[in-house]
Image (tube, grey):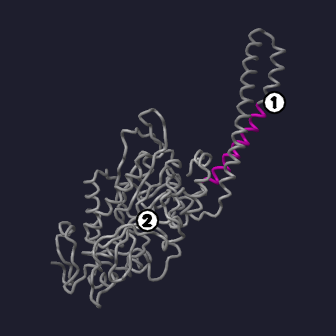
Amino acid sequence: MIPISTIRTETERVKKGLKKKNFPNLELIDEIIQLDNQKRQQQTNRDELQKQLNDLSRQIGTLIKEKKNIEAEKLKNDTFFLKQEIQEKESILKDLENRINEILILLPNVPHESVPDGYSSQDNIIVKGGGELPKLDCKAKPHWELAEDYDLIDFALGAKITGTGFPVYKSWGAKLERALIQFFLDKAWDHGYVEIWPPILVNEASAFATGQLPDKDGQMYYINLDELYIIPTAEVPITNIYRDTIIAEDDLPIKNVAYTPCFRREAGSYGKDVRGLNRLHQFDKIEIVQIAHPDKSYQILEEMVCYVESLVQALELPYRIVKLCGGDLSFTSALTYDFEVFSAAQKRWLEVSSVSNFENFQANRMKLRIKTNMGKTILAHTLNGSALALPRILAALLENNQTPNGIKIPKILVKYMGIEMINKFGSI
């Protein structure tokens, strides 16, 4: 949530930024300022009335001590009307605050000045790439066919048990999934991330604090009876660890990592882009989260991007790093870099990670603050990134590493798998 102070003091920057995100209702910014002016005036009037009431109360106390009860009673009548006026002002203040908050929660985060203009993923900018595109023969298969040939993943069985988008990993497919999870967690540990094993159900306050509500309400699974949401990403429970807290500046940055299954309804998804592992309702993901000082958050963002790059490099996958344009940024993000890996059999790039700086947008919602060494209290900056999301990583690994003799295991995963090749007769 954009701080009201930012809207007041940087009005044009906020409007320009929201326009870059293609937000259609810029008039809401002026409405907020107008409502806040009214609120301030009502607060001033209310405080003045309260001062008058306090003065009368002291006078009444003095008169009673002096046994001037008649005069005291007259003043008591005056206090009755003052109290009524104060209640009316407080009711107006509450209505104004509610209206301001109703508008604030509709406003997306203001993008960083470096975010390029644009309306969709077609306008994103490729900032870096690496690795060599694999050369497969004409008989190369997409991962959903390889998964069936090698009995690694059963999409039909998942549909039978639950529904489309809930695959069943089997045998070496299950072990490869687990190997990736352990590799990503080990790397994060080595880079100073403290592991968290959070709940995968969160309450409404947690979903609101990180910006999933109300923006992504329709994309989350909801358990009506318990009024709980199933997480779309570990970002939600991890970041909410620090909701309503004040962190000492010397304790920053805070670095956490977690593995969780993630759940997304993905309403409206269809076609070739959702085949196999391309788009699932349940999937595994490793998430890294940092809580940072505002002065250092963009340096930390670059460090997180470099870290995720090291993961895809270790897996020997061709990749590219993409800076998202304003129209493709999420509701909560100020700046996001996406990582894409090349899927050789599908001949397309697959998004496997988003690394984002939310600045103080989430922190303002969740009242996450920093106590600086100068004694000042300021809002923290929050950042997170997929490190990594597994389905499309697994898809690319299967497709890019297929050979006439089987599916080659990347060197970095051999110690986790205990094999160098998956073939149709088991493993070697």
The secondary structure type at the circle numbered 1 is helix
Image-based side of 232 in relation to 84, left or right? left
Q: Decide whether residue 99 is among the magenta residues.
A: yes
Q: Residues within 10 Å of mark 2 (few under 14, many from 20)?
A: many
User: Which of the two residues, 200 or 360, is positioned nearer the viewer here?
Assistant: 360
Q: Earlier in the sequence, mark 2 or mark 1?
A: 1
Q: Residues within 10 Å of mark 1 (few under 14, many from 20)?
A: few
Q: In the displayed orientation, state which residue is furthest to the top.
A: 66
The magenta region covers 83-104
Calculate the distance from the C-alpha at mark 2 to the C-alpha at mark 1.
Answer: 61 Å
Q: Decide whether residue 200 is among the magenta residues.
A: no
User: Which of the two residues, 371 or 394, is positioned nearer the viewer here?
Assistant: 371
- Residue that label 1 marks: 81
Amino acid marked by disc 1:
Phe
Give residue 51's position: percent from left, percent from top: 72, 26
Q: Quadrant of residue 426?
A: bottom left
Q: At x 74% / y 36%, what residue is drawn?
A: 87
Q: At x 71% / y 48%, what residue is drawn?
A: 34
Residue 89 bears which disc, if any? none
- Residue that label 2 marks: 323
**Image quarter hosting the C terminus:** bottom left
- The correct choice, above or below, for 169 with respect to 47 in the image is below
User: Which of the two residues, 87 or 184, is positioned nearer the viewer here?
Assistant: 184
Q: In the displayed orientation, state which residue is furthest to the left.
A: 428
- The correct choice, above or below, for 83 with respect to 284 in the image is above
Give residue 284's position: percent from left, percent from top: 36, 66
- The correct choice, above or below, for 40 with respect to 203 in the image is above
Image-based side of 265 in relation to 77, left or right? left
Q: At x 17% / y 73%, what residue is drawn?
A: 419
